[in-house]
Image: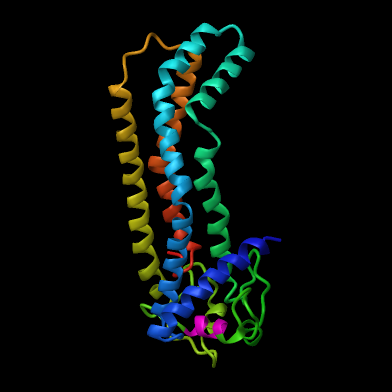
Amino acid sequence: MLDFIYYPISAVLWFWHKVFGFVLGPDSGLSWALAIIFLVVTIRGLLVRPTIKQLRSSRRMQEMQPRMQEIRSKYKNDQQTQALEMRKLQKEMGVNPLASCLPMLVQIPIFIGLFHVLRSFNRTGTGMGQPGMSIEATRNTPNYFFGVDEVQSFLDARLFGTPLSGFISMGEDSFKAFSADGSVDFARWNIVVVVLPLMLLASVLMHFNARMSMDRQKKRQAAQPKKKASTAQEDMMQNQMMMMQKLMLWVMPVMMFAGGFLWQVGLA
């Protein structure tokens, strides 16, 4: 159903694996790991322009606050006119509230696609979305842009002694697909040792990134002229903003860390 996402993502991953495989060898775990990293870099590169627009839009929204307050006060009893004047102001300042969400929204299906493509190298699992293939079948089934030889190369590759599509909660029956003869040369604790420190680091970085963003916003607000007493609507919006900030500060990092039990080594 989401092949229009899976095929382009696997194609970019295939390209970078060919590049690094030429230098380091196609069966090297490092070649595959670098291919995944540069896939993410490629995506981020494509999102540079929308991200810059998002930052500019956020700054303009801060600059617009005094004029928005005037419109709310002037048309507080006429919601239709208030909305019309707000749209005029946004057009005048070149601000599109929906555009500011674009970079984040685009990354969600891309992340889902990368998660699916990496998990689809080993299709022996019986969990959600897993077809429960035999070891022989999963090692001889193409994975979107990857042929059978590349699927086997990925399954046999190791990073710090663990397979790149292994994850902590993976069933032990699926471990056998990571070698041609069905032998298992790693244990679950190998995956834990690799994944959890990386997820802990990512969660901490997410927390401090959100904290720095909040500090910058507070400084911009402090530099603005003092406003008159806020209305009930503004108080409600302020409370909603504070809830979102707490969500980004604490809940999202915790969710990211908890997700480490489902994320593959390569994705972590």
Residue appearing at x 50%, y 47% in the figure:
103
Tell me which secondary structure the magenta stretch mostly adopts: helix
Magenta-colored span: 150-156
Which quadrant holds residue 191? Answer: bottom left
Q: Indicate whether 33 appears above or below 50.
A: below
- Spot occupied by residue 110 in the image (x, y as percentages of width and height): 55, 58
Specify whether residue 117 is painted magenta. no
Task: Please state the total of marks drawn on the protein image.
Answer: 0
Q: Indicate whether 114 appears above or below 47.
A: below
- Spot occupied by residue 25 in the image (x, y as percentages of width and height): 42, 86
Q: Indicate whether 213 appears above or below 85.
A: below
Specify whether residue 154 is painted magenta. yes
Residue 14 shown left or right of residue 265 in the figure = right
- Spot occupied by residue 248 in the image (x, y as percentages of width and height): 42, 41
- Spot occupied by residue 149 in the image (x, y as percentages of width and height): 57, 87
Residue placed most toward the observer, 183 or 77: 77
| Residue 162 can be seen, yes or no | no
